[in-house]
Image: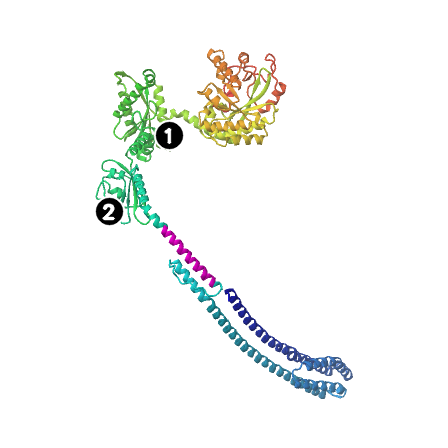
Amino acid sequence: MPLRLKLLVGCLCLTLVTLGLGVFAQHSQRGAGDLATRIYDEALLSLSYLRSAQNSLLQIEMDDLQLRSGEVRSDGEAFLSAQTALSTSLPDIMADLDVASERAMSPGGRRKIGEIRNGLQLLQQDFNTLDNTRLRARFSAIDDEFNTAVEILAGDGYRFRREVGELIEASMHSTQGAMAAAVVLAVMISLMLARMIVPPLNRAVQVAESIARGKLDNEIVPHGHDETAQLMRALATMQRSIGEHIGRIRELMAEQADSYDSHIAIQNSRFEAALNNMTQGLCLFDVNERLVIFNRRFAEMFGGLQIGVSARQVLLDPEIQHLLAPGPDGSFTHELPDGRMIATSRQAIEGGGWLDTFEDVTDQYRAQAKLSHMALHDALTGLPNRVQFRDRLETATRTPAGIANTSVLCLDLDGFKAVNDTLGHPTGDALLRAAAARLLSCVRQGDLVARVGGDEFSIIQSASDPHLGAAALAQRIVDAFVEPFPIDGRPICVGVSVGIFVTAEMAEAGRAIDPDTIIKNADVALYRAKSEGRGTFRFFEPDMDAGLEARRQLELDLRLAVENEEFALFYQPFVDVERQVVTGFEALLRWHHPQRGLVSPAEFIPVAEDCGLMAPLGVWVLETACRQAAEWPSDLAISVNLSPVQFRDPGLADIVEAALERAGLAPERLRIEVTESLLLQDSATVLATLKRFRDHGIGISMDDFGTGYSSLGYLSRFPFDKIKIDQSFVRHIDDRENMAIIRAVIGLSRAMDLSVIAEGVETAAQRDILLREGCREMQGYFFSPPKPADELARMLLTCGRGTVEDDEAVSAELVCLTPSPAADAAPRARALPG
């Protein structure tokens, strides 16, 4: 029989047993339910109706007693009322007795109820003839009959309930017996199924496990056609197939065994060649810490060793004991007794042992040491450089004692530039080396002499009396440099100027100790010494720092100006002289200081760039200019200068595009002006930003062209649209060299298809010369000074939306009536000069 059929038959048998048990239990429950229904329908219901009839009769009796004992009514009235009550209630009482008799469970109960009916009927008939005493006796007798009937019905109910209990108990015993029989049958069915199914499966499992262990000669004899027989046949086939495959594999292994030795020999030779041609030494220790492999480079580095020696024997060699000692993985470097630096890399091997590789890094180590020395020393003189000088100064001023005893001397060789220019750089270098040696001869041990610039040196001195010690040292140095330096067989005379700053003065003034301020103050004192005749020394004095304090105050005022909105934009027109039209305006930043009045951009722009205010200030200029230009006629352009500092922001292009979008200004109307100093920054970043401007339609102009260093090269690399001739050339246009430069710029612009504009035009003569040379577009006080935005509309209306009249009758709104080169330079300075 198939396994599935066996399981199906077993499950059906178990189902039938369960179903039979359920039917039996249901039958038992139905009998108990019938008995419970009879208890309610017969015992309880008949007793309830009997009690209802008794209560009605008692109520009639009570009412009659009250009527007969009343003093108000007469006997006739009381009798009529009692008779009426009995006649009215008796039918209901009789109906309740009929129901109680019908539901009575025993003949005795029905008989007793019949007697009560008869008694009530007699009472109704004799009611008119009975006095109070006999009437109460009759009521009492009927009530006793009611009580007797109640006892009979209650006894019948109790007897019936006892029968129900006996029936339920018998049903429970029967159900338990049926359940026990069902359990026995289920166990028998399960045992029978297990006997029929489990042994063949166990045999199949044993065979499969035996095959898995590699035993392939198991006796497999399938019986029957069920699933276990099919499984056994499949196992027999699998055993036979595995045996055949293993036999084939053994044959192949036998065929290949002869070739393995040659392959292994080839691989070993390759492995040995790879090991012996490594630039690093290599050795391998096994789990027992025995040397099992090393290459030729290892033998060259550490001498001959034998395969199989233990790590302890290897470690007897003091030269390599630190390198081969067992330890954790990682990389480390050791110096051998002979001075070689060996870099070791160790890697643990799974299962035990470790692999070491060794590299002779002596040359790299020396080169690194040399680089480290060069990073902190001047290559020409061997003295500490600016980096080491600053680190030493920070260390010296870290403690109160160091601050109290430290002084800084800044030195500059007087006349060195002339020597370097006239005698050449080799002589200048030799002079610097000799000067360094002479300085070292003047200082005490512990003082630091550093070369911090071309011919600039600095000294850190520590003395118990820093003023006295620094003065004595400075005098020794000045005296020492009086003696000429013998360079290449000729005496060379140079002097030295010394500026001194004592760090204790900063502490006494309550100011924070800042190395940069210390160096700056010493430099200020040095410049004072040079300005007073050179060949001398000066201590720093607070009044020397007046200029620094003024700059600091300007920075504070500048920050307040940004907060208080003290800035305004003025606009100076671009004029196409040939067409006599205004083509646009340049936005110029003005600062109206509350106390100082108008502050020149040339004064406050560098400060804004240094203190980090240029970025927000530049954004304000850009957004304000774009917003105001959006209100002009659409043929007028607006030119805005951008500081090199702003180009350090990688999001500058996004800022410009956002300003255009917020203002609603077409990108073609915006022109960005940059100076050559910008192009000396990271040219790739600057070029990418400028190209993005061009791609967006924004024009780009090079401001102050010709005043830098590499204008021609930048013109070919950067996407400029216009070149602006600097006002320094225009102001002195009569000078032959300046005129030549102007002609060259105009010609170059023509050749490169670039526009050109001249700034700083202040006279008609300058205008005429520039126009004659081919420069059509100009800007300057001759046409108009910079004006606030609210005056531009009147100026444009006066000149007919951009038309410039003949210079003989030019409008006073557009042409400065008193153009003069001596005019105040402040309002002419651009908002963002390079």
Q: Can residue 689 be seen here?
A: yes
Question: What distance separates the C-alpha of mark 2 from that of mark 1?
Answer: 61 Å
Figure label count: 2
Quadrant in which residue 462 is drawn: top left
Tell me which amino acid carries mark 1: Asp
SS at circle 1: helix
Q: Taking 252 as reference, is 296 left or right?
A: left
SS at circle 2: loop
Query: Which portion, as a residue range, is magenta?
Result: 229-251
Q: Taking 74 as reference, is 363 left or right?
A: left
Q: Is residue 222 magenta?
A: no
Q: Where is residue 201 in the image (x, y as percent from the top left)?
A: 45, 64
Q: Taking 38 as reference, is 686 left or right?
A: left
- Which residue has dot 1 on it? 516
Is there CB contact under 8 Å for labels 2 and 1?
A: no
Q: Where is residue 447 in the image (x, y as percent from the top left)?
A: 28, 29
Q: Taking 213 as reference, is 819 left or right?
A: right
Q: Position of residue 74 (x, y in %)?
A: 77, 83
- As displayed, is residue 102 above or below residue 770? below
- As displayed, is residue 687 above or below residue 132? above
Tell me which amino acid carries mark 2: Ser
Type of secondary structure dominating the magenta stretch: helix
- Which residue has dot 2 on it? 310
Residue 752 or residue 424, whichever sits in front: 752
Of circles 2 and 1, the one toward us is 2
Residue 605 or residue 97, whichever sits in front: 97
Quadrant in which residue 206 is drawn: bottom left
Q: Which colour scheme is used?
A: rainbow
Residue 166 or residue 109, whichever sits in front: 166
In percent of the image, x 59 and y 81: which residue is there? Answer: 163
Q: Earlier in the sequence, mark 2 or mark 1?
A: 2
Residue 299 or residue 195, whichever sits in front: 195
